[in-house]
Image (cartoon, helix red, strand yellow):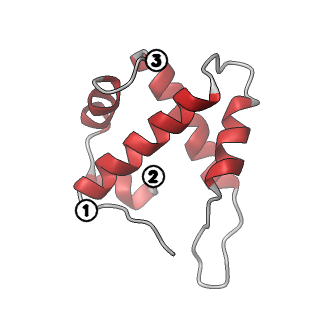
């Protein structure tokens, strides 16, 4: 999620969407999204001023956080559902 994207989406709606489709608590979803934002905010921008995020590196980063008790599949599912929601809202997409 980019800062620009945050202005265009309702975080509570996003969390409700994710929790309706995954066996994780609202607190777990918020925690994964918080660590995702930290990872993205600390990533280096490329020459075009964009941040490219490797999903495997992101999942590994979140798994290493001491306060995260979810397994790898749960984290991947939360991140996939977040992207699905953002794409449905027209806020995000994948770059080949």
Q: Nearer the viewer, residue 72 or 32?
A: 72
Q: Give the quarter of the image for residue 69.
A: top right
Distance Cα–Cα, label 3 vs label 1: 26 Å
Of residues 68 and 21, the one nearer the viewer is: 21
State yes or no: discs 2 and 1 in contact (Cβ < 8 Å): no
Please state the horizontal and vertical placement of residue 96, each as a whole percent of the image: 51, 75
Quick check: 65 above or below 1?
above
Residue named by callout 1: 90
Q: Earlier in the sequence, mark 3 or mark 1?
A: 3
Q: Earlier in the sequence, mark 2 or mark 1?
A: 2
Residue 7 percent across, percent down from the top left: 31, 53
46 shown above or below 63: below
Mark 2 or mark 1, whichever is nearer to me = 1
Q: Quadrant of residue 31?
A: top right
Query: Which residue is at a point 44% across and 56% down the rendered structure image?
Result: 3
Q: Which residue is mark 2?
A: 1
Choose between 37 and 76: the one closer to the eye: 76
Q: Position of residue 47 (x, y in %)?
A: 67, 84
Q: Is 49 above or below relative to 44?
A: below
Task: Give the residue drawn at x 24%, y 34%.
Answer: 13
> Which label belongs to residue 27?
3
Decide if residue 70 is on the left or right side of residue 4.
right
Element marked by disc 2: loop
Q: Is residue 4 left or right of residue 17?
A: right
Mark 2 to mark 1 CA distance (whole Å)? 12 Å
At 27% across and 48% down in the image, what residue appears?
9
């Amino acid at each position: 999620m980019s800062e620009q994207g945050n202005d265009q989406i309702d975080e509570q709606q996003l969390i409700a969407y994710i929790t309706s489709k995954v066996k994780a608590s609202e607190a777990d979803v918020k925690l994964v999204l918080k660590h995702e934002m930290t990872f993205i905010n600390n990533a280096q921008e490329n020459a075009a001023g964009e941040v490219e995020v490797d999903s495997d590196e992101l999942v590994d980063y979140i798994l290493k956080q001491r306060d995260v008790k979810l397994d790898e599949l749960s984290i991947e599912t939360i991140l996939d559902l977040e992207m699905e929601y953002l794409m449905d809202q027209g806020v995000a997409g994948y770059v080949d």
